[in-house]
Image (spheres, helix red, strand yellow):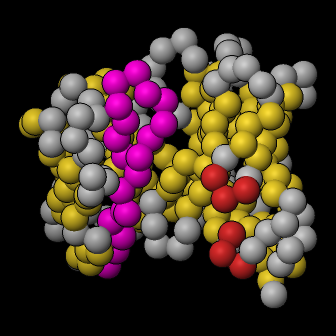
Amino acid sequence: AQSVTQLDSQVPVFEEAPVELRCNYSSSVSVYLFWYVQYPNQGLQLLLKYLSGSTLVKGINGFEAEFNKSQTSFHLRKPSVHISDTAEYFCAVIRNTGGFKTIFGAGTRLFVKA
Amino acid sequence: DAGVIQSPRHEVTEMGQEVTLRCKPISGHDYLFWYRQTMMRGLELLIYFNNNVPIDDSGMPEDRFSAKMPNASFSTLKIQPSEPRDSAVYFCASSLPGEDTQYFGPGTRLTVL
């Protein structure tokens, strides 16, 4: 079975500062990894995903994430955040051997302050 | 494309009443997922369909919950009878054949009084 742990439930940060949202996963099989973002009163939308290849993945809105197999981590980063990045961010995994059951982490709420 | 469409966006009902949530997936997507989101439990997968057939309903909390997908463009999630602990935001999502990314609808906020 797979599981996802997002280490921070809330991350406050000032505008234009860098941010890192942490995600660790556990799985006995190879997985694909995702970050989704949820803006207030909206559904989730994909930020980026890692399937294979380069461990540094770039997504929308200037976000990137790095897959670290040895540490079973997939941390999300942005060098300079904007007020509009205030949202909830979900890390998720899906096994890459078939099936589409996505396991989501508990979410990290990012507050960007002026 | 209009994206995944869910209705109603908000539903307020009284305990014991039947509630039906509706979802129209993106055209051409053959996977459909129902999720429930609460503060306490986060985002939980309730059930998912492939080509209108339920594949995994292990997340359905109890017999009061049922889901159907009579055709490729429509699905329902029914709660009968509803209870206050069912209050949550319910999301529908769909994905393309062989595609790992899910596309979420805006959700239905259910309040059971």
Residue B44 seen: yes
Rendering quarter of residue A9: bottom right
Rendering quarter of residue B48: top left
Q: Is residue B53 left or right of residue A32?
A: left
Of A5 and B1, nearer the camera is B1
Residue B61 seen: no
Q: Is residue B105 left or right of residue B15?
A: right
Q: In this picture, is A8 found above or below A105? A: below
Q: In this picture, is A52 found above or below B60? A: above
Q: In this picture, is B111 found above or below B18? A: below
Of A40 and B18, nearer the camera is A40
Image coords of residue B113 (percent x, y): 32, 78
Q: Residue at x 82, y 52 (%)?
A: A77
The magenta region covers B93-113
Q: Residue at x 34, y 50 (%)?
A: B92
Image coords of residue B2 (percent x, y): 27, 57
Question: Is A67 covered by the magenta stretch?
Answer: no
Q: Residue furthest bottom?
A: A114
